[in-house]
Image (cartoon, rainbow, N blue to C red):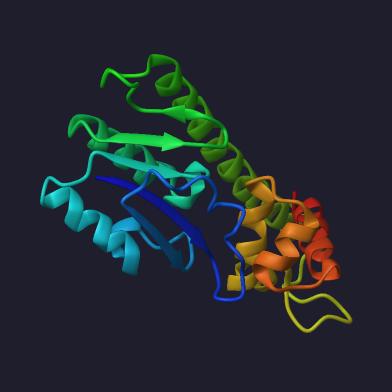
């Protein structure tokens, strides 16, 4: 069986741009939940797991690899597991696949996903490290007091808020300000505040 899988973060978001050219698929599954939730723990993702466990899945396709998860390790593990089971995983944007039409490992795609995943993971770690170092440096210089004059929360608290973390993840993943505003349901000024806070803390 061939399955196409899409995901958006909220009920209000439209996934129509992901759902194109789907006539050849047996099932089209859409989850509306955070990308931080493991694929097989999502409502529709669990149905994909059942198809895999029953030996009924031969092909799963997504618009982009981050639809499967935001955690690099879990996405790479899924890629590896599907490859070992002989299940073809195809990503449309950018275009790559674990197995080619003959069922053989697509070496170029294997290299590509490893590089993309490593770069993405490295960038996230660097941003977190800059945030940590910025706060520590400010403390040593006596500039950081945990709560700035005229604000209702500290930089550390602001960066730890769930909404802020969502915005930071989307910034890391290369989404535009307009896309982030739509995905996270926040104003442009909030996004600018997050960006400026990262720069200040970095």
User: Toward which corner of the image does residue 11 lie, by quadrant?
Assistant: bottom right
Q: Please tell me whether residue 108 is drawn above or below residue 158 in the rendered image.
A: above
Measuring from the top left, give residue 107's x and y in whole percent.
38, 15
Q: Residue furthest right?
A: 150
User: Toward which corner of the image does residue 12 lie, by quadrant?
Assistant: bottom right
Q: Residue furthest front?
A: 23
Q: Please tell me whether residue 55 is drawn above or below residue 37 in the rendered image.
A: above
- Residue 156 seen in this snapshot: no
Measuring from the top left, give residue 55's x and y in whole percent.
12, 45
Measuring from the top left, give residue 65's x and y in whole percent.
48, 42
Foreground residue among 27 and 106: 27
Q: Which residue does the image show at 48% across and 51% down from the upper left?
A: 67
Measuring from the top left, give residue 9's x and y in whole percent.
54, 66
- Residue 149 falls left or right of residue 7: right
Q: Please tell me whether residue 125 is drawn above or below residue 166 in the rendered image.
A: above
Q: Which residue does the image show at 47% across and 28% down from the upper left?
A: 96
């Amino acid at each position: 069986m061939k399955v196409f899988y899409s995901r958006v973060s909220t009920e209000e978001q439209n996934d129509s741009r992901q759902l194109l050219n789907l006539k050849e698929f047996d099932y089209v599954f859409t989850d509306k939940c955070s990308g931080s939730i493991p694929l097989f723990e999502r409502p529709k993702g669990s149905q994909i797991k059942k198809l895999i466990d029953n030996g009924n899945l031969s092909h799963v396709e997504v618009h982009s690899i981050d639809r499967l998860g935001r955690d690099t390790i879990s996405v790479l593990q899924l890629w590896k597991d599907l490859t070992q089971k002989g299940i073809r995983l195809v990503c449309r944007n950018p275009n790559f696949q674990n197995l080619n039409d003959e069922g053989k490992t697509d070496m170029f795609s294997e290299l590509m996903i490893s590089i993309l995943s490593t770069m993405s993971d490295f960038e996230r770690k660097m941003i977190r490290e800059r945030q940590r170092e910025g706060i520590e440096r400010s403390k040593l210089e006596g500039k950081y007091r945990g709560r700035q004059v005229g604000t209702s929360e500290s930089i550390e608290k602001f960066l730890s808020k769930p909404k802020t973390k969502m915005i930071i993840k989307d910034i890391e993943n290369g989404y535009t300000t307009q896309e982030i505003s739509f995905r996270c349901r926040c104003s442009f000024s909030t996004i600018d505040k997050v960006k400026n806070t990262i720069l200040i803390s970095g």
